[in-house]
Image: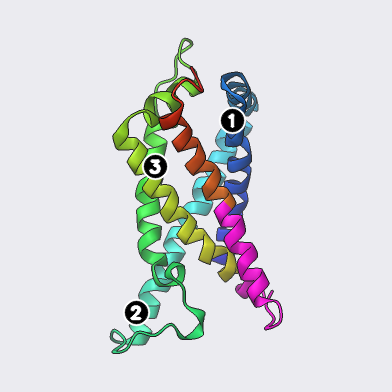
Amino acid sequence: MALTGFMLGGFLLVHTIGNSTIFWGRSAFNAYAHHLHSLGIFVPIFELGLFSIFFLHVITGIILFLENRKARGSKYEVETSAGGRTIGSKTMPYTGIAIFVFILIHLINFHFVQKTETKTISDFVTQVLNNPFFTLIYGVGICLLFIHISHGFWSLLQTFGISHPKYDNPLRLITWALAGIMGGVFILITLLMVISRNQLL
């Protein structure tokens, strides 16, 4: 679970950096997208690998969730915040399901859509994020993603043995900051399309 989460986190970081080119306007963003598609055969190979990692992450998450439920036997009679439990740790299975649905919507909007020579990726971004329905979907989806990965990053550090009472609090702040930066970039992109619709026109 931690290993696939680490790989997905690495992809998300690269995706965040790449999508941040949108702040430099249409040409920069389209150039980034063109560079990715110029990689040819490596693109479907990478996508297949990414899908496999994501599928393994989902399946592992479901198995762990069911095993935890089975081991616990019944719902706790008293819920406490002992052990430093956060909203992220309490809601991991549920935010995971919501993120899965969000990713499907995202792929339908940008990956499976029929590309044309007269319509670039920036055109699709403008069209989708100028739709109030999708603005809301992306806003909620990104917030849930932040909650999920804020605990996910922290959890994988624990799994990899990167933990010490002296450094746990700073490490937790770092994981929250990293998740916040990633989520913040995507939230800003969404807001940019609402506030300044001409950014990519």
Left or right of residue 158: residue 121 = left
Q: Kindly identify which residue carries mark 2.
A: 69
Cα separation, mark 2 vs mark 1, equals 45 Å
Which of disc 1 and disc 3 is earlier in sequence?
A: 1
Vertical arrangement, residue 34 with respect to residue 134, above or below:
above
Cα separation, mark 3 vs mark 1, equals 18 Å
Which of disc 1 and disc 2 is earlier in sequence?
A: 1
Residue 120 in magenta stretch: no
Say which element carries label 1. helix
Q: Nearer the viewer, mark 2 or mark 1?
A: 1
Say which residue appears at 50% left-offset and 84% top-offset: 83
Q: Kindly identify which residue carries mark 3.
A: 138
Q: Nearer the viewer, mark 2 or mark 3?
A: 3
Say which residue appears at 52% left-offset and 66% top-offset: 151
Vertical arrangement, residue 20 with respect to residue 69, above or below:
above
> Which amino acid lies under the numbered mark 3 shown in the image of this protein?
Tyr
Vertical arrangement, residue 22 with respect to residue 54, above or below:
above
Q: Are marks 3 and 1 in contact (CB under 8 Å)?
A: no
Q: Kindly identify which residue carries mark 1.
A: 23
Residue sitting nearer the eye, 87 or 110: 87
Q: Nearer the viewer, mark 3 or mark 1?
A: 1
